């Protein structure tokens, strides 16, 4: 795998230097490279490699959905037949309003939902329609579902990896 | 806050594939036909209005270390105390109270699986409530951003 060839110590430094975000300025990478004591080109090349190796999912800007009016987020969980989950998970993940879609293990007898989809909308009605759309897409492969409203965000921080 | 159409398009463009280039905003300027300075001004203004939660690289927690989604079923009157304890771990980066029998949902990230288990063990040793440990089996769409509409 590509990532094995990357300098692990340097990667940790890059994660640590960029986890609080890049500055919005003409040369954001130069600013971070200076902090790390490496060249701007070197940093860009390394980030490119980390992206190719899957260590970085994306480079970009994460909107504050809540401030932008997308106040209703809902964790929806579905009990999907094992033989159908691969194909159906892909389809659910492609829906515009789904920000995260994961398969997770069942933990019987307490928990039998194996597909998680986080949906976002501006009001309750919009979110209800989205849930109905997922339900329709899953069809008979879905045996049960429930939705978990968030009542309170108690902690939300970016990933912290100590270097 | 209400986004202008221009800002909405700009935000949708920069959610992914942000240029890995010494002058990324200049590249965007060429692509969008908007002056570099205007892009910077608009993004700074959005940042000041708290419309941006983060700008930078989104790391793959799974590849960069180990993680799980965990949940606890806690009696209502104890939830605040348990939630504060859970949040006190540096390894916990999301912690939500949700409307369900399992009413506290949190993400644990650590450099390796042992680190994740250590946190879960400490939590279950302190509060003996039903605990779900649901590490990702497969991701179908993971934090790639989504278009604003």
Image (spheres, coloured by chain):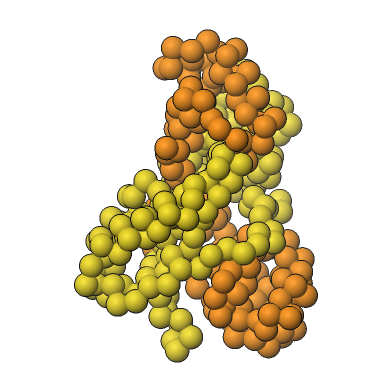
Chain colours: A yellow, B orange
Q: Is residue A92 visible?
A: yes
Determine which quarter of the picture holds residue A26. top right
In the rendered image, residue B99, in percent from the top left (x then y), is placed at 56, 71
Q: Is residue A132 left or right of residue A153?
A: left
Q: Image point 70% across, 30% down: which residue? A: B48
Tally the marks: 0
Q: Nearer the viewer, residue B46 or A23?
A: B46
Quarter of the figure with the C terminus of chain B: top left
In the rendered image, residue A126, in percent from the top left (x then y), is placed at 41, 51
Q: Is residue B58 left or right of residue B127?
A: left
Q: Is residue B51 left or right of residue A112?
A: right
Quarter of the figure with the N terminus of chain B: top right
Q: Image point 58% across, 63% down: which residue? A: A150
In the rendered image, residue A46, in percent from the top left (x then y), is placed at 54, 35
Against B118, residue B28 (above or below) is above
Q: Is residue B140 visible?
A: no
Q: Image point 57% across, 24% down: which residue? A: A41
Q: Nearer the viewer, residue A46 or B90?
A: B90
Q: Image point 56% across, 80% down: which residue? A: B101
Q: Is residue A19 left or right of residue B60?
A: right
In the rendered image, residue A74, in percent from the top left (x then y), is placed at 49, 60
């Amino acid at each position: 795998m590509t990532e094995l060839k990357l300098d692990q110590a340097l990667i940790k430094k890059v994660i640590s230097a960029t986890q609080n975000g890049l500055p919005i300025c003409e040369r954001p990478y130069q600013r971070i490279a200076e902090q790390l004591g490496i060249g701007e080109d070197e940093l860009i090349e390394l980030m490119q490699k980390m992206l190719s190796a899957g260590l970085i999912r994306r480079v970009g800007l994460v909107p504050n959905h809540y401030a932008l009016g997308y106040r209703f987020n809902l964790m929806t969980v579905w009990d999907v037949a094992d033989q159908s989950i691969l194909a159906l998970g892909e389809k659910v993940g492609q829906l515009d309003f789904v920000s995260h879609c994961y398969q997770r293990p069942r933990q019987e007898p307490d928990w039998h939902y194996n597909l998680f989809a986080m949906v976002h909308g501006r009001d309750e009605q919009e979110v209800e329609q989205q849930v109905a759309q997922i339900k329709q897409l899953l069809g008979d492969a879905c045996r049960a579902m429930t939705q978990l409203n968030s009542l309170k965000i108690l902690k939300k921080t970016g990933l912290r990896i100590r270097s | 806050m209400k986004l202008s159409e221009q800002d909405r398009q700009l935000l949708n463009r920069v959610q992914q594939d942000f240029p890995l280039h010494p002058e990324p905003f200049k590249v965007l300027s060429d692509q969008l036909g908007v002056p570099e300075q205007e892009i910077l001004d608009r993004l700074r203004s959005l940042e000041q209005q708290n419309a941006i939660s983060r700008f930078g690289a989104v790391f793959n927690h799974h590849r960069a270390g180990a993680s799980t989604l965990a949940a606890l079923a806690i009696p209502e009157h104890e939830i605040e105390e348990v939630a504060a304890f859970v949040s006190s771990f540096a390894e916990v980066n999301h912690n939500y109270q949700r409307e369900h029998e399992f009413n506290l949902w949190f993400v644990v990230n650590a450099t390796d699986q042992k680190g994740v288990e250590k946190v879960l063990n400490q939590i279950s040793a302190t509060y003996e409530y039903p605990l779900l440990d649901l590490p990702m089996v497969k991701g179908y769409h993971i934090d790639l951003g989504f278009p604003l509409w």
